[in-house]
Amino acid sequence: MASLHDVAKLAGVSKSTVSRVVNDEYGVKESTKVKVRKAIEECGYFVNQVAKDLKLQQTNLIGVIVPTVSSGAVSQGADGLSRVFEQAGKYVLLANSQHNNDKEVEFIRLFNQKRVEGIILYATHLDKALVKVIGQSDVPVVLVGQDGSLFDIPSVIHDDSRVGFVAGQRLVEAGAKKIGFIGVNSQDIAVDSMRYQGLLQATEFAGLGEPLFHSRGEFSIESGFEQMTELLNTYPDVDGVFCATDRIAVGAINAIKCAGKLPGKEIKILGVGDDELGSVCSPSLSTFHYSFDSAGETSAQVLLDLINGKQQHMSKMVLGFKSVARETC
């Protein structure tokens, strides 16, 4: 393997001159740079990037922690943040926590050891252990999907409480009176608790009282099917269902059809996320469009500002949504 000495000998310059060219430092004539770069190519010399990063006190690495790689929301968000970081000359290291709370804490510590410049966490919960490790982090951490602003953690969130309220309004306007909610793990404050609280406010405002039910399952079509099947047995008069995600809603649609009822006619259904599955299922799913791509872009820009020492004027950024009307509501 070629060394710095080999390059210097071939180019007829000193090792320090080669080093300045490699590190893009000032004080080297353009003609000398051309000669050194030609020698580097001929020798097949590779820059020791680790040593270079240590000298410059930067790695250009960003840690991104996601709960799963199969989610449309995550993949769209990753596309958005990757574009911003690429333009800034940063590289993304992706870690999959697989919805394991302990792994999120572990990855934050690991990324600090790997000398990343910042971390983006697609959070599914917010507990004492997570808040503590974020507070101990040597590099800035930005949350996506959960509101950490009370703990002074910069956050990019969706308007989950309001989407629940608007969902309730849409179901009521469609004629539903016996309305229920199918959510997820109670630790997921944004997707489960906030969306349910918004729905609760809407049903109470409409004079219907509390929702008929608040069930909890997983982020999957199978879970939506299983929950809706059980709920139809327990609450046969349900005529409106708000599902925390589109995948859950697609499962619920299948369960309603299997029970001999008409989704969109006898039982109105709404999801969240505008997953492409919702547009191709039958009947097509009415939902709410979240700009997951923009969430990724926004979180990346917030993190870059923190890395560059720019003052943050907002502790959290709340992204809006759009109603998508199809056949189920």
Image (cartoon, rainbow, N blue to C red):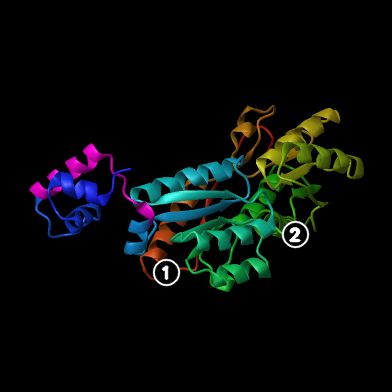
Q: Nearer the viewer, residue 30 or 272?
A: 30
Label 1 packing within 10 angstroms: few (<14), some (14-19), many (20+): few
> Observer-nearest residue: 66 or 324?
66
Question: Would you say 247 lies left or right of 292 here?
Answer: right
Name which residue lies at 40% across and 64% down. Answer: 307
**Residue 176: image location, x then y, percent:** 76, 44
Q: Residue at x 85, y 38 (%)?
A: 229
The residue tagged with tag 1: helix, strand or loop?
Answer: loop
Q: Which residue is mark 1?
A: 312
Q: Write down the region rendered in magenta.
A: 31-50
Q: Are marks 1 and 2 in contact (CB under 8 Å)?
A: no
Question: Percent x, y for residue 144?
Answer: 55, 56
Does 141 sit left or right of 201 as displayed?
A: left
Q: Residue at x 42, y 49 (%)?
A: 91
Q: Amino acid at mark 1?
A: Gln
Q: Position of residue 244 (x, y in %)?
A: 69, 48
The kind of secondary structure the magenta stretch mainly shows is helix
Frontmost of labels 1 and 2 is 1
> Which of the pair 243/62 is nearer the observer?
62
- x%, y% of residue 150? 58, 72
Q: Which residue is mark 2?
A: 204
In magenta stretch: residue 265: no
Residue 314 seen in the figure: yes
Residue 36 falls within the magenta-colored stretch? yes
Q: Separation of disc 1 and disc 2 at Cα?
A: 37 Å
Image quarter hosting the N terminus: top left
Observer able to see residue 323: no
Query: In which image quadrant can residue 241 be found?
Result: top right
